[in-house]
Image (cartoon, grey):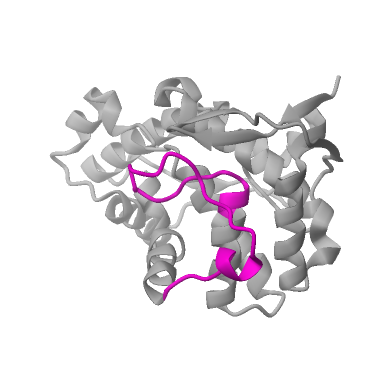
Amino acid sequence: MSKTYIFQEYKNNEYQNFVSDDLIEVNINSFRYFEFDIQEISSFSNTYNKGLIPEFIINHLKELLNHYNLQDFEQEFISLLCSFQSTHLLYFETDLNESLTNDFVNAIKQKKQIIKALKLYQSDKKNITSIQFNPLKEKALKIDNWFLKNDIFNALIYYYGITEQDYDSILQDENNLDFKYSEEYIPYYVVNTVCQFLINRDLNQTNALKFIDFFLRIAQIKYTNDNNTDCIELYDNIEDNINLTNGDIKALRQKFIARKKDFLI
């Protein structure tokens, strides 16, 4: 049975229902233009088919889309507004271990298996006879050539930065296996997806980042480390809302676009 998502306000370092008399009902649809691998976002419309959002939030979103000639994607961004905030709250409000989804838990288990396989391979390269890839719509691809196996394992060892002395300590300490997903993960993932969407529609990166900054604030996603900020400001004028300094744009680019994804693991 579908439900209604109640849009939240960020205030005093926590999320709460908006105290507002102008909540309006909006439709939440499946995505047509965005592709997300995160189940909570991609399948959000399977759980929620309606949202209750303050009218001024919707007006800000419309203003943003109109300013960049993206009004045809209004429904897409309304759905993203709700699914983005809801998924972000999973990681913001709960303890890390409690908030890990099944995918992340399985990732930790499989990472442990990878570490064990790397240890076996590095102790004796004959231990691993083959590596197999299983494409969704094609036959399994089996790699048993010594040179190719060596390339794959060396790439993984280099990626994880492991030495022979590291294996036992890594496997004994579960914390070393944890994926460090935090409240930064969802904004990082969504921002990069939206930024690419905007660039594909002929916005330069600077304007894309201005769009993203305002969209994050509309979604009530706090992404700065300013502890003095007890709420997220939205201004009456569109020009004030997208008026970022060069320093602001640089900081936004470094936090999301230029940042390597491996900060998450």
| Residue drawn at 25 percent across, 42 percent down | 124
- Residue 7 vs residue 34, the one in the foreground: 7
**SS majority, magenta:** loop
Per the rendered image, the range of residues in magenta is 216-245
> Which is nearer the eye, 240 or 158?
240
Q: Quadrant of the C terminus?
A: top left
- Side of 171 where 140 appears, left or right: right
- Toward the viewer: 11 or 99? 11
The x, y position of residue 108, in whole percent, is: 42, 31
Residue drawn at point x = 72 percent, y = 47 percent: 56
Q: From what the image shows, is residue 250 above or below residue 212?
A: below
At a point 38% along the width and 52% down the height, the residue shown is 262
What residue is shown at x 16% (from left), y 43% (from top)? 164
* Residue 238 rendering spot, x and y as whole percentages: 65, 66
Displayed quadrant of residue 48 = top right
Q: Work out which quarter of the rendered image holds the N terminus and state it.
A: top right
Rendered view: 148 above or below 92: below
Query: For this view, does 195 lie left or right of residue 263?
Result: right
* Residue 42 in view in this figure: yes
